[in-house]
């Protein structure tokens, strides 16, 4: 992983548009223009949904929010995508406003600058609700990357993906600019990240991760930590996949409950949500068990973690969950030191 390229955060790009943006001086003109711009790229139903969502208390702010001296990027599902989604009826429910706010990024993210395949660009949306439990009033993020270009020169080259837990949304056509917004049509209605437990129990994730993450749920349950992990307020979870638990089955099950709990705590950063572009070498992260955690990049582009004398490879990074982010790893790091004071000071 090339950390300089991957540290490309959407917020840093928000200056790109501002200088050229001409924002109509009347809100009516602005909204008419936005409607036309969305219609022109086959996203009329996204406009309808935005207009309708203003009837819901929690989302009345969405259109107001766009008419501002700031840049935004709309990931607008094309009209056909709404028919395919389970939210085909666009009623002005509060949920619609929440859903739409997850399609609006608070920065200008030019699709041509999205990180290449295997690296990610993390873009913060406007989505925030009682169900999302992120630190410091942070909003929920979407994870972007450009599509694999194993065959450059193909007509598809230049497409971008939005990576969900068990799905990818793909860009359709190129991005267009309107006033202070960039509009990128996409082929799906995005799904708001669900809880840690729901995400890790999904059978779709098991297939994609090629090993699943259900042993982890069993392990946190066995040491009575399921609830404290599930309600951890804005946390980074390094989750060993099932195969990793199989590999240490005897060693792990031979530990007492306290040591097992310590091992699991040493796979969590408590109170901070660290996406892969923010994982930096030489930064001394401290786990919820109070142990230092080091992040290492190797020459072959792989990223590893080290806790004590154990090392794990990240096999899939940046799965957003309602209370933080999950990175799947290939090894259970059997570090049994638990030093809550040091964890708390961190
Ligand atoms: C919607 O679903 C149909 C049938 O599964 C599929 O052919 C079509 O490509 C889908 N459209 C979009 C925009 O995903
Ligand atoms: C969080 O941010 C929103 C929108 O910017 C603001 O309305 C709200 O007051 C903030 N909440 C806290 C606790 O800072
Ligand atoms: C999403 O895209 C990534 C990168 O190309 C791929 O590895 C993964 O299998 C895709 N997931 C789905 C659900 O198609
Ligand atoms: C994105 O950046 C490219 C390269 O700088 C530029 O040609 C293109 O117009 C930009 N796209 C939008 C929608 O502004
Ligand atoms: C995270 O820290 C909070 C506050 O110190 C604590 O109450 C909670 O139990 C911790 N959670 C985990 C999983 O370490």
Image (cartoon, rainbow, N blue to C red):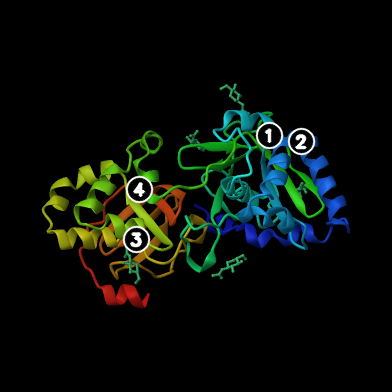
Q: Kindly state the secondary structure of the residue where label 3 is placed.
A: strand
Instruction: Looking at the image, tell me whether mark 4 or mark 3 is earlier in sequence order.
Output: 4
Ligand 5's image quarter is bottom left
Position of residue 33 relative to residue 81, above or below, is below
Instruction: Looking at the image, tell me whether mark 4 or mark 1 is earlier in sequence order.
Output: 1
Work out how far the residue at label 2 is from the one at label 1, CA to CA, in angstroms.
Answer: 8 Å
Q: Which of marks 4 and 2 is in front?
A: 4
Instruction: Looking at the image, tell me whether mark 4 or mark 2 is earlier in sequence order.
Output: 2
Crowding at mark 1 (Cα within 10 Å: few <14, some 14-19, many 20+): many
Q: Is mark 1 within 8 Å of ligand 1?
A: yes
The residue under label 2 is: 41
Q: Kindly state the secondary structure of the residue where label 2 is placed.
A: loop
The residue under label 3 is: 268
The residue drawn where x is 29% and y is 69% is 291
Q: Is mark 4 within 8 Å of ligand 5?
A: no
Work out how far the residue at label 2 is from the one at label 3, CA to CA, in angstroms.
Answer: 43 Å
State the mark number for residue 78. 1
- Taking depth in this image into account, of 37 and 116 the one nearest to the observer is 37
Question: Are the residues flagged by discs 2 and 1 in contact, CB closer than 8 Å?
Answer: yes
| Residue 153, position as x, y percentages in the image | 68, 31
Question: Are the residues flagged by discs 1 and 3 in contact, CB closer than 8 Å?
Answer: no
Position of residue 40 relative to residue 1, above or below, is above
State the mark number for residue 197. 4
């Amino acid at each position: 992983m090339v950390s300089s390229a991957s540290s490309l955060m959407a917020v840093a790009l928000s200056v790109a548009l501002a200088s050229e943006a001409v924002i109509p001086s009347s809100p009516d003109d602005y909204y008419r223009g936005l409607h036309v711009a969305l219609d022109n790229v086959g996203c009329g139903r996204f406009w309808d949904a935005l207009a309708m969502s203003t009837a819901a208390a929690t989302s009345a702010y969405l259109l107001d929010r766009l008419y501002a001296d700031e840049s935004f990027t709309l990931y607008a599902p094309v009209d056909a995508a709404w028919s395919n989604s389970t939210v085909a009826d666009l009623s002005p429910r509060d949920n619609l406003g929440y859903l739409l706010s997850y399609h609006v990024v608070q920065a200008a993210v030019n699709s041509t600058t999205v990180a290449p395949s295997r690296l990610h660009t993390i873009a913060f949306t406007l989505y925030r609700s009682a169900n999302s439990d992120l630190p410091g009033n942070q909003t929920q993020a979407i994870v972007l990357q450009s599509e694999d270009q194993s065959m450059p020169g193909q007509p598809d080259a230049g497409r971008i993906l939005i990576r969900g837990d068990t799905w990818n949304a793909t860009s359709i056509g190129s991005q267009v600019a309107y006033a202070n917004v960039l509009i990128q049509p996409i082929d799906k209605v995005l799904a708001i990240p669900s809880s840690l437990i729901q995400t890790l129990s999904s059978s779709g994730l098991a297939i994609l991760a090629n090993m699943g993450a259900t042993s982890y749920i069993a392990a946190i349950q066995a040491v009575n930590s399921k609830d404290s992990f599930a309600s951890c307020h804005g946390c980074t979870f390094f989750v060993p996949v099932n195969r990793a638990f199989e590999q240490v089955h005897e060693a792990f099950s031979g530990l007492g409950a306290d040591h097992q709990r310590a091992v699991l705590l040493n796979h969590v950063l408590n109170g901070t949500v660290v996406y892969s572009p923010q994982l930096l070498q030489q930064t001394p992260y401290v786990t919820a068990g109070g142990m230092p955690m080091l992040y290492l990049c190797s020459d072959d582009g792989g990223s590893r973690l080290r806790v004590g004398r154990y090392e794990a490879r990240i096999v899939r990074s940046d799965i957003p969950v309602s209370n933080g982010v999950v990175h799947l790893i290939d090894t259970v790091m059997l570090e049994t030191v638990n030093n809550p004071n040091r964890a708390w000071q961190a």
